[in-house]
């Protein structure tokens, strides 16, 4: 099965380098415009995070296609860091502890990176099982969601942050039931 991962288009929070997880931000004008300047592969099944930025991206890229949403594909809950950028968090002792942990501590009042990754992987497993007879599935999701799934299943193996991709970009993969082989970057 071909699986396409697309990170949603730019939002105002992305432009300002903010931690945007549970905030349901729309695409900004720059985000909408940049999506119209690329070609994206068509797919049989279109799956999205339920967040507005992902739904809007999918509607722009695949205007006549039915969208199936999966709640567990949403971005990480950044808790007390939500809506802030690193400058605003500078001097925050919880933020410094999180940085010093290499990003492994739970976000204060939010989700732990480990539980977030497990949630995304479980959703991906459910999607690939549910649509196992489909030829192609496209996931319009968040950067962290893509990184979580690729860290688990992509070969050759790379670490989580190695799979970071820009807004409106992503990966085309072949899924054999246990591994994702990257065939192209979008």
Image (cartoon, grey):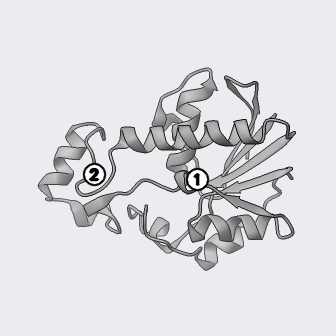
Element under label 1?
A: loop
Q: Indicate the position of residue 153 as horizontal and vertical percent values.
A: 60, 27
Q: Is residue 56 above or below residue 102?
A: below
Res. 175 image quadrant? top right
Marks 1/2: CA–CA distance = 23 Å
Q: Nearer the viewer, mark 1 or mark 2?
A: 2
Camera-side residue: 86 or 108?
108
Vertical side of 177 occupied by 91: above or below: below
Say whether disc 1 or disc 2 marks the residue closer to the N-terminus.
2
Horizontal side of residue 55 vs 88, given as left or right? right
The reply to whether discs 1 and 2 touch (Cβ–Cβ < 8 Å) is no
Task: Find residue 137 and name its label.
Answer: none
Residue linked to disc 2: 107
Q: Is residue 173 above or below residue 112?
A: above
Q: Which residue is mark 1?
A: 166
**Front-most of 37 and 177?**
177
Q: Residue at x 57, y 37 (%)?
A: 149
């Amino acid at each position: 099965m071909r699986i396409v991962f697309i990170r949603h288009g730019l939002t105002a929070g992305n432009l300002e380098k903010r931690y945007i997880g549970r905030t349901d931000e729309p695409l900004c004008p720059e985000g909408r415009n940049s999506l119209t300047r690329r070609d994206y592969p068509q797919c049989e099944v279109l799956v999205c995070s339920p967040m507005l930025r992902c739904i809007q991206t999918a509607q722009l890229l695949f205007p006549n296609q039915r969208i199936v949403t999966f709640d567990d594909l949403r971005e990480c809950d950044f808790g007390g860091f939500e809506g802030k950028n690193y400058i605003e968090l500078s001097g925050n002792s919880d933020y410094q502890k999180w940085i010093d942990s290499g990003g492994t501590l739970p976000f204060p009042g939010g989700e732990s990176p480990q539980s977030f990754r497990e949630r995304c992987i479980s959703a991906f497993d459910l999607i690939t099982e549910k649509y196992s007879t489909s030829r192609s599935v496209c996931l319009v999701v968040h950067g962290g969601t893509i990184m979580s799934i690729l860290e688990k299943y992509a070969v050759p193996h790379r670490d989580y942050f190695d799979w970071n991709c820009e807004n409106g970009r992503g990966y085309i993969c072949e899924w054999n039931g246990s591994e994702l082989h990257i065939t192209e970057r979008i």
